[in-house]
Image (tube, rainbow, N blue to C red):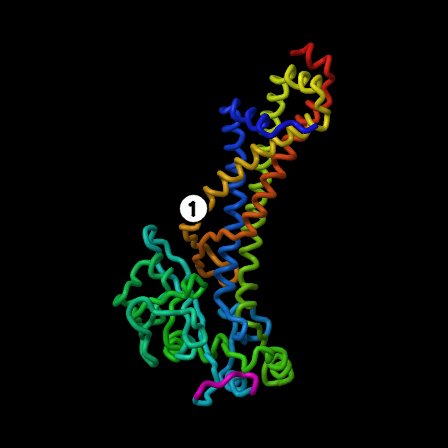
Amino acid sequence: MPIPLNYIARNLRVRKLTTALTAGGMALVIFVFAAVLMLDAGLKETLVSTGRADNVIVIRQGAQTEVQSGIQRDQASLIESVPEVARDAAGQPFVSKECVVLNSLPRLGSGKRANVVVRGTGPAGAALRPQVRLIEGRMFRPGSTEIVVGRQVRDGYAGVELGQSLAFAQRKWTVVGVFDAGNSGFDSEIWGDVDQMLQSFRRNAYSSVLARLATSDSFDALRARLDADPRLKVDLERENRFYEKQSQSLSDFITILGMVLSVIFSIGAMIGAAITMYAAVATRTAEIGTLRALGFRRRGILGAFLLESLLLAALGGVVGLVAASFLQTITVSTMNFVNFSQLAFGFRLTPGIVLRTAVFALAMGAVGGFLPALKAARMKIVDALRAG
């Protein structure tokens, strides 16, 4: 015969202080656990949303990033001439030949300098990235020393307001617009004319070539064609997959660090839950004996105390998850370990994170409450009544 649920809930209400303290400890663990998962999800969402599956990026063979890459002009011309590349209405290849470099800017508040990606591109560059839209000013004019900055650059760095001038690569660049890239990695970039960028940074090769596939299944054919051409020593990847790989190192670091902290905190929370439940068993010895005398079986006692621990964990889990959900209003800026530039991204709460957090909370409750529940279930009726 199972013990009624309202009896179990009443025991938690009676012990308000210990219930609050134990649930609070578990809430802290859940907050840390959910925050790590949300940070990782935000990072991956930012970088994956940076690319499209129907775009491909071509970089030099062996290069890991666009900053490290170099595509010669004649190679870029060969790439844009292949039939697997889409054409626009005028019959021109839907291709953007780009130059990507790093430039340091002072951060707002601290004044410390941090690397920002500067991308030289052309009209096709914006067309290939429909998630990018101007929110202030206008787009830079081809052939000019005008630049547009991403929303995160405007919000995080000094001297990049509309109309301001930035001095780098021995030239002055005027900020004529601010763009929003839909919380993608492009929000942390500065864009300007590719030819002007190449001249200013004294480069004779592009960093990458971005192209739209003629059809969704043209990728394998394009890869085979480029691999077979001895004049091209290049690697290509779908744009979304390329940026997803860029997040792997930082994602692994965040996950490992977060999981280590979560494990350490969870051990403390489980010990706290065990102490609370052992105390409950000790103070309710006579009650346990009475329940046994009334006909409740050992497994009923075991289930009741274990359920109390699970309810404590569930309460802590809800509080911790609700608190973590407010982190979605915060934007984090950190270094991308792959290209050593600053990347801004936010916390993202997903249904999968909610599910994983709930399972983690209940697992803590089960582990912390099992031994005390087992002790209560093993008590003999006579010994329990006598002790009470």
Q: Is residue 248 magenta?
A: no
**Of the residues shown, which amino acid type is indicated by label 1?**
Phe
Q: Quadrant of the N terminus?
A: top right
In the image, is residue 250 above or below residue 215? above
What residue sits 31% from the left and 71% below the top? 173
Q: How many marks?
A: 1
What residue sits 57% from the left and 72% below the top? 237
**Residue tagged by mark 1?**
326
The main secondary structure of the magenta stretch is loop
- SS at mark 1? helix
* Residue 265 locus on image (x, y percent): 56, 37
* Residue 151 locus on image (x, y percent): 36, 62
Q: Quadrant of residue 271?
A: top right
Q: Nearer the viewer, residue 230 or 53?
A: 53
Query: Does residue 12 appear left or right of residue 101 in this picture?
Result: right
Q: Quadrant of residue 181?
A: bottom left
Q: Nearer the viewer, residue 369 or 72?
A: 369
Q: Nearer the viewer, residue 245 or 113?
A: 245
What residue span does the magenta drawing correspond to? 83-89
Q: Is residue 84 magenta?
A: yes
Q: Quadrant of the C terminus?
A: top right
